[in-house]
Every structure is written in structure tokens, then in C-alpha cells.
Amino acid sequence: MTTFISNLSLLLLVGFLFLNPVISDSRGETVAQRCSNRTTTPQQRSLVVTNFLAAMDAVSPLVEAKGYGQVVNGTGNLTVYAYGECMKDLDKKDCDLCFAQIKAKVPRCLPFQRGTRGGRVFSDGCFIRYDEYNFFNETLSSQDVTNCSNKEITGVNRTLFRANAAELVKFMSVEAVRNGGFYAGFVDRRNVTAHGLAQCWEPLTRSGCAECLSKASEQIGSCLGKEEGRALNAGCYMRFSNLKFYNNSGNSTSDGNGGHNHLAVILAVTSSVVAFVLLVSALGFLYKKKRAKKLREKKQLGSLFMLANKSDLCFSYENLERATDYFSDKNKLGQGGSGSVFKGVLSNGKTVAVKRLFFNTKQWVDHFFNEVNLISQIDHKNLVKLLGCSITGPESLLVYEYIANQSLHDYLFVRQDVQPLSWAKRFKIILGTAEGMAYLHEESNLRIIHRDIKLSNILLEHDFTPRIADFGLARLFPEDKTHISTAIAGTLGYMAPEYVVRGKLTEKADVYSFGVLMIEVITGRRNNAFSQDSSSILQTVWRLYGTSNFVQVVDPVLGDNFNKMEASRLLEIGLLCVQAAFDQRPAMSAVVKMMKGSLEIPTPTQPPFLNPGSVLEMRKMMSPTMEDQSQSSGWRSDNISENPRARSVKITCSPQLEHNETVFVPNFVASMEKISQVVQTTGFGTAQTGSGPDGNYALAQCYGDLPLNDCVLCYAEARTILPKCYPQNGGRIFLDGCFMRAENYSFYKEFKGPEDTVICGNTTKRNNATFGDAVRQVVRNAVAAAPGSGGYARGASENGESAFALVNCWRNLSPESCKQCLEDASASMVDKCLPWSEGRALHTGCFLRYSDQDFLNKIPRNGRSRGSVVVIVVSVLSSVIVFMVGIAIGVYICKHRTIQKKRRGSNDVEKMAKTLTDSSLNFKYSTLEKATGSFDNANKLGQGGFGTVYKGVLADGRDIAVKRLFFNNRHRAADFYNEVNIISSVEHKNLVRLLGCSCSGPESLLVYEYLQNKSLDRFIFDVNRGKTLDWQRRFVIIVGTAEGLVYLHEQSSVKIIHRDIKASNILLDCKLQAKIADFGLARSFQEDKSHISTAIAGTLGYMAPEYLAHGQLTEKVDVYSFGVLVLEIVTGKQNTKSKMSDYSDSLITEAWKHFQSGELEEIYDPNLDWKNRNDSIIIKKEIVRVVQIGLLCTQEMASLRPSMSKVLHMLKNKEEVLPLPSNPPFMDERVMEFRDGSDGDSAACASLATVSQSSFYGR
């Protein structure tokens, strides 16, 4: 029973941890701004400004709704025409963000600046324009501009890039017209790629679009030879670049429901976890009553139990339960992948940290044993000390020394009540961590690899001495081994490339993780806050290395308070640690010496995943922030929910007019520009421009729970509205997410004034006394907490009433002024607004709000990412889930007591069983048992990662293949249901046919057609059997496999990604025709999605690099696997086997090198038997062509790989000229040796990935 519950909850948790939000690039930075030279009279200006602001207000919702919009406002010569549009490759979120940014820039051209009547702003993601005449159908104008990069393309590639760019520009000018006014793509020859995008504005006719783009292609011709160029015209936009800058999503847009879906998932998972904890408590009691102590010792912890009971490491479960107040939530320090950590106080007064494992399954017992065994044998000042453990109660507990300051991750990104870490403290933390790791690797009696070095696993003492924690994934490393092969486990973003790709583990994997951590500490940015095709912090640091701007990546909160030479040295050491080639990374002992200055620092080489062809332009606006997406054990796991709350509440303008507009307006605009830069990175900013009566002082701040992306949106809205106060010389605007004020004097210390006011909700009243009491209490608590917490606090009622509050002082105020402002404002708000359901206090120095609706974002942020998860409606959901699951378990125990460990734990499969019972797909378990001779080994066809396959003969004489799953737990049940669901809905000559299944017996079975020749790998990797497959037969197999994949990707009613294309999953019928098998890992894929984020699953050596690095799944993952398969078929070699030395090339690299040198014949499988044929010349060309297609399919950038329909077209149209393939991934051969990984600890990767080593039929 506990196995069932554990696996169910584990699957839910793993699914939760892999919810990877995608952060793309809105390309909102201004490329060019042009203001009209037409003027207006001073008497007309205020009216034109009014019409302009109204037009801006009207065009924004149109752009948000459909990506473009046009508005006409006013009459006569005061009319304002406005237009805005986003590039069609942006999704809705990025379109909104881009347009908000440029909309805030266009007021520079307002008539009060230089008497101008029009203006336009171009960014690389969107466009905005306003004018005094109808320009909507205008194609060209005198203000059109060409923008060329300052950087020349140099070296041998200059001529080729120029030719590629010229061809691309010409092609775009034609293709965009044919494609509804938009085109994005590339031209690639000999690994030199030119990327481009062209777009006409929506109002243009087809002929107008053609005219504009034709002119743009002429203009941009002057930029050829440069790295990039832009043509910015009245009716269109065109750009080319040597780097990919556009999104792959094309015209796809978001439906805007992602936030709600994300919240639903969070609630569901949180509820499941709470339900699980309650269930474990009940089941633990039953388990303890039913299971004898001797059996528990034997099956759970074995010898460790005996050892611990005889040593001083042993704590009684009851003592630890009392010490933590029965694991009360108020004592909870954090939660990670393997357990929760609670603060406890022992009877002797000693404070401890108690780690409570989620699950007591075999896998987690291994983690428990591993952590106790390793950490109890080592001792160092920079390692968390294990005080003991408990294995006598219903669950396993670890007892550590208590570290008061919690984790480094919390200090950098979460906690609001602490000062930012100084440079000296950061240096101390980095050095101490390095010393602790040097001890683990070289100085202890045991050579230990931690495998999960990251910020959340570095705890800080009161004096900021670092302590390395969480040894659940650590591995002993024999002295006589250069590496060990193991199932991958760890945290994405911190794992070394050779370990992610092949499971190859050395101490240099820890060095890589340390390098990432080191750079994170120095820069204050996360490395795992990136998605496909975006810039990671490693990229940023590498790009700036060797330039005068190198130290600009240091955390901006430090200002100039750090040693620049020391920072440069540490960043250089960090780059050394994250080099692609593991043997070039220094040992940790060498890192310590370099930090102390006793060892010279060598020059680092390029980090992995940074090949120039696949790196986009670094974002210049801001670094995206997101919570720790840890896939492993750690102290905390948070998530994100966002709402910009950009609704205007009140604007108040100064009673005084500006003194001299020619001085005042430029000062105002300059202050807005200055403040924008800091608000975008910290959520708060002040700026001063000029002095005297026409000087300008400005302040802007987002409220503490707003994420940075939403802060930018809210601030952009505020900046757009504030100019409505002109010609008054100042004003303030309150929005529900941010505040902005500008005056002609310094107001920064003000916290009260005559403009202070209260706004009450006027729709509903809550007359019950309990609501009023709840509001008073939650507001009182927040007001008391805020002055000591950076001026920000929030709260929710705990007495059953729905009452929520947020209070925020401006950051420039002292704690005393903040306290006074909040006390005055809260008293006024509560007195005037109750019993209304909502109230706001808008005071000079602070903002307060209460409501009976939860308006708060779930993760409070204050410029930097910081906060904690606020759990809502969990108790109700948990109660329902506990009740439902409890009933299901009761029935389950009664009906299936004797076979419970063998049965599946999936409600989906139970539903499937009911559906199949009366269908033609249903087979009785007894029928299949009889058909296979009770699963006799004599009928065994093969065995893989998910099950064993047997040959069977039905009563009617038909031969069948029966797949018998190893495990019927929740995870395997999902695979079973997935395979039945997917393969029963598809039908194709190149797909294995599912005849049915059985889910009525003690285990789940799948029934397939029997293919007597079994799998392809039996032939191509066997010298003797390989002779059966000459080139013609292999070519037919390649084409058949391609046809099957085309059907899955494009022709079936559901778009399906297989995720495990490999030779052992290609079966051969009696005519040696290919049939794709094993859909256990397949995923359906919606047409309106550009990718899905999922836990990585597949077979090492066949998985695409973007899928391994980011978990982002597109059909191009299957294309990559197909390319590997093609090369294996041609060469007879396995990409997943390293057949020579530790430094031998992979099959892909070997094929690439021979293709480049024109010596492909050297790697052909001798069994191809093509030289002795009459048509050998034709066959030779065909084989070369097929290898070239395989290399095209295995290119590093997913966008460069052809679709499977294009692959099939290239295979069948042998006269068509093929493009030249670019570099395959991971070209450093010291990182390229593939390992099978089957001798590793496969259980250890369960929290991170499903690594398939299955073969449908055995070889």
C-alpha cells in the first residue's frame, strides 16, 4: 500500500518540479525613433496632447487583442491618427511587454517637446506611430531609415555571409508578400547562416506591401557585409543578422489562459502533497501495527538499522516528533525533491534541523542509506554535520545541526528581511564552498562526488560560513577509476554536459556545478532561469569576458562596493570551471589556490551550449527572474503566479503650471528615461534632472509582490498616463501594482500631504462583524511588519473570513517615516471604508489595500526574485482528495490485498480497463497466460527498460507478441495507458499494430502483431546478420521509418512525438519492412503549441541537445533521433557505444568529419555490399546523400533541422540539391564519449528523467 501511495505522489511531485515556465524575448528595446518636423501652435498643444493620450489608451487594447490596431481621435486639424503592431512571431505575453515599452517612449515626440505633430518608434518586436494625417496605407516616407550594425563580418566567411544575406533579403521581399505580409527564416551554406525577418503592417494592400519590401531590400543592401542591418519604413520592417533573433512560433499566439492553468496545476499538486502527508500518517500507523520489526529491518534499511541502533547516531522517532511540534508547519524550514526540513528543539535545548523523507520506497531508502553512510564518515568546517537519524518510526528521519541563516539561495533571491550580501561575504562563501568540495574530492578518506551543488544546498551560519548540505545524491568514487557511468540525477542548469548526455560522472561534474554557483553568487542571477534559444548567465559572462565591460555583470546591488580586480579574477575562475571539456576544468584544490592567489589563472575556453550559430543576441533590457526549478533534493521549491495589476486607481496633478516648457519638458523626459533603467532591474527608482522651478524629480516603485516582467508592464502604463498632467509641473499616479510621481522639487522624504486620500469599494458591503474584525487584524499585522521588512508586507485572514491586505512604503523612506505613513493611512482607510468589501489608502509615502478577494501575486518580488509560496484553498481541496483517495484505498485493499504490489496505481488505467472490458481490444489475462505458456522463458523474445516481450500463439493459431510490464506502479501505469491510448488511435503500414491489451489480471499486458524478424539492431550491429541487409534493403527501411514519422507528426488526427526513435524500436516484418514500435514514452502535441516542456525521457545518445538541456519538446527531437538512426544504419555502428578509447569520436562527429573531408567510404558498413554492383556509382551518390540528410537531421539548432516531411521529400527526390549541414552538437571530442548507462543506479534519476534502455525485442 505504501508503494502505491509513494509512487502516486512521486509522479505528482516530479510533474510539479518540471513545470518549467518559458521566458522568451519580447525584443522591446528601441531601435529607432523619429519625430515629425510638422509643428503646432502653442494654443493647440494641450488639445493635441489630450487627443494623443486618448488615442494611446484606445490603441493598446486593440494590440493586446489581435496584435495590431489603428485609432482615429479628434476632429479637424487637431485629429490624431495612431497605429501599433507586433511582429507576428511574438506570443501574446511578449507582444504586450514590447508594446508597453515602446508606448512609453513615443511621448518624446509630443508637441510640448519641439512642437511636433507626429512620431514613430521601431523596436525589433513591435512598432508604434501617431500623426496628424491618415498614414495607415502609407508605404514609404521621408523619415524611413536604414540601420546598419557597426560590426563587420570578418575572416573567410565574409564573402559567403554577404552572399547568403543578399539572397535572404531578396527572398524575404517576395515570400513575405505571398505569406500574408510576414516571413522569418534563414539561408545556410557551408555552416554560414544568415537569419532574417520581414513584415508589412496590416493595413497595407498586397501591392503596397510589395512596394515597401522592394524598397526595403534596396535600402538594406547598404548593410551587406555588416553583422546585421535593418530597413525601417513607413509600411514595413526588414532585418537580417548573423544571429537568430526571431521566435520559432511563427504566427502562433497564446490564448492567455496559461496563468490559470499553472495555478490549477499548483493547487492540484499542492493538494495532492498535503493529502499524501495525511495519508502517510494514517498508513504509517497501520503499517507499524501490521509489520513486524524484523521484516522492516530486513526490507527497509537492513544492516544500517542494526548499526544505527547500536550507535549514538540513533534518535527515537517520538523525541524528534516532539522536538518539531509534530512536524508543525510553523517549524518548516523548506521543502525539496526528497523531503521536508523542520526546525526542532531537543529536550536538552539544542536546536536541530530534521529532514523528513517523503517516501519510504526502495529508491528513497537508497537515498537515506546513502546520505547517512556518507555524511557520517566525513567532517569538515564547510560541510553540514549529521547528528543522527531515526529509523524506528513510520518514516525515515535525518537529524542535522541547525544553520540559522538558511540557504544561500534564500539570501540571494528570497528573503526580504536581510541586507544584500556584501562582496566580502560573497568571497567568503565561494571560498568556503570550494574548500568543502576540495575536502570531499581529495582530502577525506572517501572520494565523494556530491552531484547536486547549487545555491539551495549551501547553508549559511551566523557569520556566513558556508556549509554544503544534502548528500542524498552523492556517490563514492573509487580511486582507481577515471570515471563511473551512472543514471543522471541532479538539477538542470547545474549539471555538466558530459554527465547530462551520457551519465559519465567524475569529480569535474561537481566542478562544473561549482562554476555555475560561483557565477550566480557574483552576478546575483540564476543560470537555470533560461529557456530554449535564450541567453543564460554563462553566455552573458562569456560574451563580456576579455572586454572592458567584464565586471558589469557583477550584482548591481553592490554598486561600486567591490574589488573590481578580485571580481574579474573570480569570474575568470568561474569560466574555467564551466568549460565544455571536463579535463580542462581545474580540480577544486586548484580553484582554492587560484582564489587565494597562489596559482596562476589560465585562459578559459568557451562554455558548453554556446556554439556561435545557436546563440541569440543577449537581452539588454533585463534578466528574467524565475524561482528555483530544482529537479532534485533541496531545501525549497517555489513557483510563480503573475498579475501586473496595471489598472489605474487615481491620478492627481499639481496645481502649479510649468514655468518654461522648453526647459521643463526635456527635463521631464530625461528623468523618465533615467528611471526606466533602474525600475526594469530593481522595481524601484528615483531620478533628478535640472534644478530650479523647471527641474524635475521623479520616483517610481512597483509593489513588493510584483514580478519584474509585470513590474515593467505596470510601470509602462503609469508612464503613459502621467503626461496627462501637463502643463502642470507635477503629478502622481496610483495603480494597483505600482506608483509614480514627478515634481519640480525634491519630495523624497515626504510621507504625508494634503493630497492623501482614501478610495472605498462601492459595489458590495460586508455587514457582518467578523469581516470587519478580520480586516482590522490583517491590516494591523501588515502595518506592524512592513517597517522592519523593507517597507512591504502582506497578509490574509486566518479566522475563516476572506480578507487580504497589502501595504507598501516607498523605499526612500526611513522606517520611522514608513511606520507613521502606514499608521495614518490604515486608520483612515479602515474607519472610512468598512464595511465596504474593499478599500485603498493613497498617501504621499505609502499605499494600502484590503479586499475580500485575493488580489495578491503568489510569489512576492521586490526587484529581485524573493518570496515564499502562499498556499490558497488547499485545506478544502485536500479534505476532498483525502476523502476520495481514502475510499478508493479502502476498496482497493478489500478487493486486491493479495496482489496489491503487482497491480498498477493509476486511476487512468482503471478507467481504461472499464472502457476496454467490452471492446474488441480486450484480452483475458488467462488467455494470454495460456498463449505464452505461462510466460515461459522459451517464448521470451526480449527484455527492455519497461517490460519483457513474449511470443504467444492464440487459440485461433495467430502469432502475437505480448509485452509484460515490469512494474505496475503509478509511473508504469501511466506508460501503459499512454501506449494504449496513442497506438490504438493511429494506423499506418510503418507502425506496429496494437491488437489489444489486458488489464484485468495481476499485471498489465499489451498485445501486438508478431514480427518474426524482430528489431533492426539485431541486424545492423551484428556482423553476420548484417549481411542480410544490403544497401537497397537499408534504404527501404530508412524511407519506411521516415514515412511512419511523417504520419505521426503531420498526418494523424493527433500530432504525436515518439521520443524514443532508435534501432531497437524499429521492427522488421517478413519482407524486412520497417515498423516503429514502443510508444510508452510518446506524447501528443497540440497544433497551436510551438513546444511543450516535459521531464526528459528517452535513450542517451539519441536525445536532441535542446531537449536534454531544457526539457523542451518539439517534433524536431524525433528528427534528431532519426538522424542518429540513419547514420547507424549506414555505418553499422552504435552512437551510444564508445568502442575505442575514452577520447574517441561519437558516431555523429565521426560522420561529420568524414563528410567534411570527402572520405565517407571509410565509415560505411562493409555489409552494404555496394562496390561490386553494376550501378555502384549511383549507389555511392545515394549513400552520400543519405548521410548528408542524417547530418542535417542532427544539427545543433532545432530550427535548422528539416521536418520529417521534408526529409522524406529529400529521400525520394534524389536530384534535388541538399543544403549543407551545420555543426552537430557537442563538438569537443573530450566530452563526446557515449556510455550505455545500464550499469548505473537507474533509480537515482527518477526525479529527473526517464532514460530508456529498452529494446522491444531482445537482440
Image (cartoon, grey):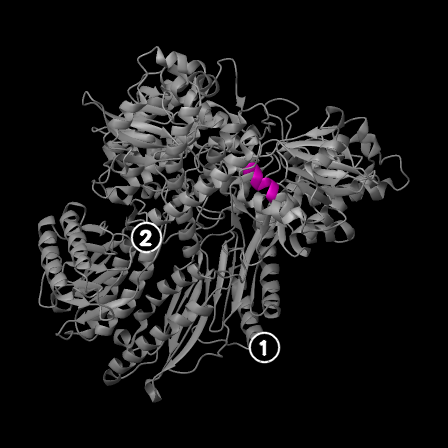
Residue 93 highlighted magenta (yes or no) = no
Residue 510 occupies quadrant: top left
Q: Residue 1089 carries which label?
A: none
Residue 972 highlighted magenta (yes or no) = yes
Q: Residue 207 carries which label?
A: 1
Which residue lies at the image location 68% right of the left edge and 39% below the top edge? 1006
Instruction: Compute the Cα span from label 2 to label 1.
Output: 44 Å
Is 14 drawn above or below residue 314 in the view shown? below
Which residue lies at the image location 52% right of the left edge and 21% below the top edge? 483
Within 10 Å of the Cα at label 1, are there few (<14), some (14-19), or many (20+) other Cα atoms? few
User: For mark 2, what is the residue?
Assistant: 707
Percent coordinates x, y for residue 1156 in the rendering = 67, 39
Percent coordinates x, y for residue 751 in the rendering = 11, 58
| Residue range (magenta) | 971-977
Percent coordinates x, y for residue 421 in the rendering = 24, 37
Of pointers 2 and 1, the one earlier in the residue sequence = 1
Horizontal side, residue 1136 vs residue 42: left or right: right
